[in-house]
């Protein structure tokens, strides 16, 4: 029996059945509504919100810590810190005197717009230039959910495989910038930067790529400059 027959039988069964079937469709629809509310709130308060996405341990929080240290005088920024459990990352950021709230996804692999909206609405957005959302560590799910952000930023550390951009193409194709982090470790690894860059360009030919280390500070200047330009262009 071929696949076609199987589908035909399934169709006949559905046609002949008198049972009611519950269909749960358009769950993303509610997320879209909240994402729109976030866009409206950001537009009203002149706030830029960036959605940082990368694997657990790729250096998302470390990047934000370094930015907090380096941009104290010229940018007022807040972080909405997404994790499945614990407030560890929010506590790390709090020591740098930046405005931070912890969003717990409660087991979910991504943040949804409704939760982000409520945390965002509680901030004094008139006094904030930039809000970073550090999404739950994951290369797949967060890329699928619109949280009303200005841009998604993909973070990939060089301790991961150089072919991740083609293995997880949605994130890297949607990203408005890609950060290659932990670049200070390059002498100790067999990571092939050129091949990684060509994989990124394969899914997103024009995306800016920032090779940096939050540990040593290498490459941070170019990254901070790109961030500043994004705020100015608001
Ligand atoms: Mg983190």
Image: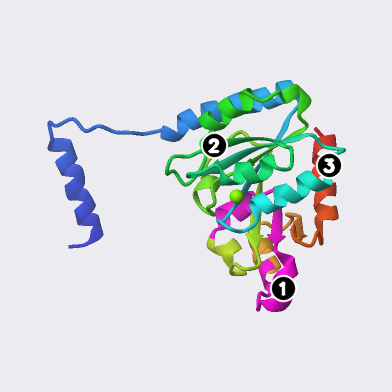
- Mark toward the viewer: 2 or 3: 2
What number of labels is visible? 3
The CB of the residue at mark 3 lies under 8 Å from ligand 1? no
Location of residue 23 (image quadrant): top left
Residue under label 1, please give it.
186
In this rendering, position of residue 121 left or right of residue 9: right
Residue at the spot x=81%, y=59% of the render? 217
Sequence-wise first label, 3 or 1: 1
Segment colored magenta: 168-196
- Compare residues 29 and 4 and report the one nearer the observer: 29
Q: In what element is the residue under mark 2?
A: strand
Residue 25: give x, y in percent of width and height.
Answer: 36, 34
Residue under label 3, please give it.
228
Whether residue 222 appears in magenta in the rendering, the answer is no
Residue 56: give x, y in percent of width and height.
Answer: 55, 56
In this rendering, position of residue 179 left or right of residue 134: right
Q: Is residue 151 visible?
A: no
Residue 94: give x, y in percent of width and height.
Answer: 68, 40
Residue at the spot x=84%, y=54% of the render? 222
Q: Which residue is most to the front?
A: 95
Residue under label 2, please give it.
103
For label 1, count other residues whose C-alpha is less than 10 Å away and answer few (under 14), some (14-19) or many (20+): few
Give how far apart the Cα atoms at labels 3 and 1 are: 27 Å
Q: Is residue 196 visible?
A: yes
Q: In what element is the residue under mark 3?
A: helix
Q: In which quarter of the image is the N terminus?
A: bottom left
Residue at the spot x=55%, y=47% of the render? 143
């Amino acid at each position: 029996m071929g696949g076609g027959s199987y589908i035909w039988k399934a169709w006949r069964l559905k046609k002949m059945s008198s049972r009611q079937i519950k269909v749960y469709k358009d769950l993303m629809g509610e997320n879209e509504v909240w994402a729109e509310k976030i866009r409206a709130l950001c537009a009203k308060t002149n706030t830029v919100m960036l959605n940082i996405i990368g694997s657990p341990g790729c250096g998302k929080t470390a990047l934000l810590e370094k930015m907090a240290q380096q941009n104290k005088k010229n940018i007022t920024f807040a972080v909405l810190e997404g994790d499945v459990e614990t407030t560890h990352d929010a506590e790390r950021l709090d020591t740098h005197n930046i405005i931070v709230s912890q969003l717990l996804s409660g087991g979910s692999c991504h943040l949804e717009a409704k939760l982000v909206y409520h945390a965002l609405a509680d901030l004094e957005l008139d006094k904030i230039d930039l809000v970073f959302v550090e999404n739950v560590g994951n290369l797949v799910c967060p890329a699928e959910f619109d949280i009303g952000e200005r841009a998604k930023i993909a973070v990939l550390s060089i301790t991961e495989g150089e072919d991740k951009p083609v293995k997880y193409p949605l994130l890297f194709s949607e990203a408005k910038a890609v950060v290659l982090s932990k670049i200070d470790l390059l002498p100790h690894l067999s990571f092939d930067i050129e091949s990684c860059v060509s994989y990124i360009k394969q899914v997103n030919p024009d995306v800016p790529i920032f090779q940096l280390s939050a540990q040593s500070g290498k490459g941070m200047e170019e990254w901070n400059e790109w961030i500043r330009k994004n705020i100015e262009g608001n």
